[in-house]
Amino acid sequence: MATPLAQNAPFGSILAGQMAVAEYNNGAWGGFDVRPVAPLPLSPAAHVLHYGSACFEGAKAFLHADGSVNIFRLDKHIARMRQSARLLVLPEPDPLQLRAMVLAAIEQNRAEVPAAPGALYLRPMLIGTTPNIGAAATPSTAAMLIVLCSPVWDYFAGGAHPLRIFVEEHATRCAAHLGMVKTGGNYAAALGPTLAARQQYGVDQVLFCPGGEVQETGAANFLLIRDGHILTRSLDSTFLHGVTRDSFLQLAPDLGYRVEERVFGVEEMLEWVQDGEAALSGTAAVLSGVGTLLRGGQEIRVSDGGIGPNTQRLRAALIGLQQGIVPDTRGWLTRV
Ligand SMILES: Cc1ncc(COP(=O)(O)O)c(C=O)c1O
């Protein structure tokens, strides 16, 4: 059980005690085991350490009132991880094995799953381990797949605050063909522009809008919301296809919203936020309201600068489903 100190820990800074591990060698995945979290035996020549052959996932499992632990949209996260591996020319995890690894890791860490509004954050990770520093243009033929678990508590324990977001119209978050891949290099690429904007403008996040087209932030998708209408960028290779984004787009029609997915520009976004809402969606953020946009040195308030009623309503609907308060009619939860 978490100590009071742990409950104040930043998101992801604490690991549960056990991890599931499998290795790929000679063209096949071996079986997995669950073992105590410990440093990895890794050659300093490992492919991942030189050529960035790594991808990961981020999902959440929730403790329900009946004592069960429920993983949100596990199949969708597994499918995205396999796609990331494929696009990085890493050995694809076997979906059934990865599923079994996640379930086994949760089972072994069950005592560390926090009660709502906390959750067990799940972090499957895949790395290329072939020891060859000359392999810049050849894929790793050996790999390690690990499932880490991290107890996380209320992201907004001090109360949700409306976010300040810098509108970046020049720098890209990552290479255009890799935006849909969840790989460390993309986050490394976004870090410089994000830190610079934080320092200069005191913002929480950067909204990447290369060439004036609204894309996503460093760790979340971007939605515009009005009474009865949601607008977000249509899927392409340039940004991450968020599981949370997809979930809101599926839930929204039942709550009376029309969903529009298409490319739109910064000017249209600025018109929209005069009387509409803007929000970031993601596994960690759920749905976080944007209060202010910074563009070209100018501060633009999103409606009245607070967190809007539509954002709060959609967020509550998703959290209710995840926490077992609202029935899961879509089969999105996997019970452990
Ligand atoms: C770059 C990026 N975009 C979007 C998202 C949201 O994705 P998801 O809803 O699957 O967490 C994330 C979250 O991890 C992210 O890192």
Image (cartoon, rainbow, N blue to C red):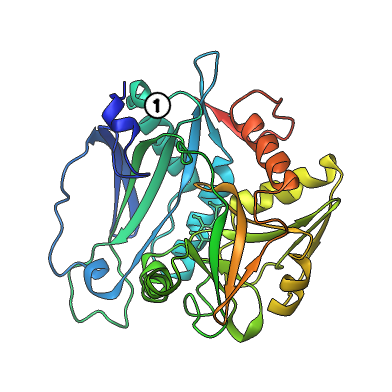
Q: Residue at x 28, y 38 (%)?
A: 15
Q: Is residue 271 above or below residue 16?
A: below
**Residue 97: x percent and y percent?**
43, 41
Q: In front here: 103 or 239? A: 239
The residue where tag 1 is placed is: 113
Q: Residue at x 68, y 33 (%)?
A: 331
**Residue 183: x percent and y percent?**
41, 65
Count of numbered marks? 1
Q: Quadrant of residue 265?
A: bottom right
Q: In front here: 251 or 167? A: 167
**Residue 58: x percent and y percent?**
46, 48
Q: Residue furthest top?
A: 66
Q: Quadrant of residue 180?
A: bottom right
Q: Is residue 162 above or below residue 324?
A: below
**Residue 98: x percent and y percent?**
43, 43
Left or right relative to 102: residue 272: right
Q: In front here: 319 or 62? A: 319
Q: Residue at x 30, y 69 (%)?
A: 140
Left or right relative to 83: residue 106: left
Amino acid at pointer 1: Val
Ligand 1 neighbours mark 1 (CB distance < 8 Å): no
Q: Secondary structure at mark 1?
A: loop
In the picture, the quarter occupied by the N terminus is: top left
For mark 1, does the 10 Å Cα neighbourhood hold few (<14), some (14 to 19), or many (20 or more) residues?
many
Left or right relative to 100: residue 282: right
Q: Is residue 172 above or below residue 286?
A: below
Q: In front here: 2 or 243? A: 2
